[in-house]
Structure formats: C-alpha cells, structure tokens
C-alpha cells in the first residue's frame, strides 16, 4: 500500500534526477560552446580576409600562398631561362644540365633540336658568349597547370661585334610531389615548352 509520504519521496527523487541532468547538460553545452568558439577564433586569426581587385573577399592565407607561389614561379622561370640561354664555350654543358632539371621532356626536345641544328657546336667552334641581359615573365595562377609567357633578351658576343636578340617562349608550370635540393629548389616543372619567336633587336644601355 502506497502512502502520501512515499509518493512525495519518489517525486523529490525524480526532481533531483531532473535537476542533476539539467546541470550536466548545461555543463556539457558550455564546454562544447567554448571549444567551438575557440576554434572559430583561432581560425579567424589564421584566416583573416583581404579585399580583391574586384571587391571580393579573399582569405588572407590564400593571398599569401598565391603571392609565395608567384614569387617562386617567377624565380623558377628566371633560373631556367638564365641557364638555358646564358651560354659560353666553357659553361654551356653545366648550364644546360641545370636547365633540364627545371623542365620536362618538352624542354629536352628543344635542347635536342638546337643541338641537331649545330647551335652548341658553333658556340664552341667560334668561342661565342651568349649572355642573358633581361627576363620578363607573365604567369596565370588561376588554375594548374599555370600558363606562362617569357620574353628573354640576350646578347651574343662575337669578339668585336655584339648582337642582341629577343626570344619569346611559352609553356606551363606544374607542381612536383617534392622539391629537389639543390637541383629543383622550387618544386616546379616546366611543361609544354615552346620557343615562339626569335628576332634581332636594337639594344641601348
């Protein structure tokens, strides 16, 4: 037989359980909210925003990564064109070897064609000096592979006579899985390489 006192005891016990459950849920909710808030704050610090040229909001981390990529890509192209077109009878073999590490088979094909045409034989035979005096590259980093266009100006010294030429080359850049120190420090590779035009120009210091 149940008494009113027993009913009151059961009610109090139930109320106690409900209160404890509410307290535990409140504590868990507070802890989870704190963790989420901290992660959002930390993410906001590491992912600040910048305004793009067209007014769009861009994560600052993306901007920094793109700027770093642009610097490395331009330096990669500068190194390649310096090695590939800066030649003389004593250093051209080592320079060509360095250049070939920066490109794929399309670069090697251009090298083999130039070799078959006797470019390097004439260089050694007449002790010519081919010196790069200017490199200007444009690259589109919108999507990989990154297309580029480079204008290289170099001089060929034939003793008493110096001629200046302008070479326009195009191709694309892709990432390698890892960098190769010191042969390919930027971890990029030139693909679809092509010599578009070569013309003699007037150059004034």
Image (tube, grey):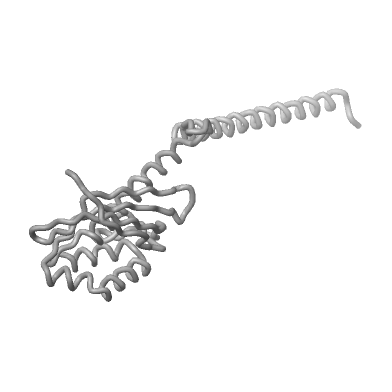
Residue at far bottom of view: 116
Residue 99 location, quadrant: bottom left
Vertical placement of residue 7 versus 175, above or below: above
Residue appearing at x 29%, y 50% in the figure: 75
Count of numbered marks: 0
Q: Residue furthest left?
A: 160
Residue 130 vertical placement versus 59 (above, below) = below
Q: Quadrant of residue 182?
A: bottom left
Is 203 or 167 nearer to us in this picture? 203
Residue 179 point in image, percent of width and height: 33, 58
Report the quarter where the N terminus lies: top right
Q: Quick one: 20 or 145, which is closer to the camera?
A: 145
* Point 75% across, 26% down: residue: 15
Query: Vertically, is 144 above or below 43?
Result: below
- In which quadrant of the rendered image does the C terminus lie? top left
Question: Which is more toward the observer, 52 or 163?
Answer: 163
**Can you tell which quarter of the image residue 129 is in?**
bottom left
Along the viewing direction, whichever of 92 and 42 lies nearer the viewer = 92
Rendering coords of residue 141 (x, y %): 44, 48
Percent position of residue 33, x then y: 58, 31
Q: From the viewer's perspective, is residue 147 above or below residue 91? A: above
Residue 121 x %, y %: 18, 73
Q: Is residue 40 left or right of residue 89?
A: right
Residue most extreme to the right: 1
């Amino acid at each position: 037989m149940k008494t009113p006192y027993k009913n009151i005891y059961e009610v109090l016990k139930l109320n106690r359980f409900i209160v404890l459950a509410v307290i535990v849920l409140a504590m868990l909710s507070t802890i989870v909210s704190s963790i989420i808030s901290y992660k959002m704050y930390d993410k906001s610090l590491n992912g600040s925003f910048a305004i793009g040229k067209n007014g769009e909001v861009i994560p600052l981390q993306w901007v920094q990564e793109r700027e770093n990529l642009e610097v490395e890509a331009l330096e990669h192209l500068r190194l390649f064109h310096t090695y590939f077109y800066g030649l003389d009878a004593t250093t051209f073999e080592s320079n060509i070897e360095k250049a070939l590490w920066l490109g794929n088979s399309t670069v090697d094909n251009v090298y083999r064609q130039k070799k078959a045409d006797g470019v390097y034989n004439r260089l050694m035979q007449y002790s010519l000096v081919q010196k790069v005096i200017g490199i200007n590259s444009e690259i589109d980093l919108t999507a990989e592979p990154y297309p580029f266009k480079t204008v290289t100006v170099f001089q060929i010294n034939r003793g008493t006579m110096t001629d200046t030429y302008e070479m326009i080359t195009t191709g694309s850049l892709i990432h390698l899985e890892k960098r190769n120190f010191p042969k390919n420090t930027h971890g990029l590779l030139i693909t679809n390489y092509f010599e578009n035009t070569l013309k003699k120009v007037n150059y004034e210091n």
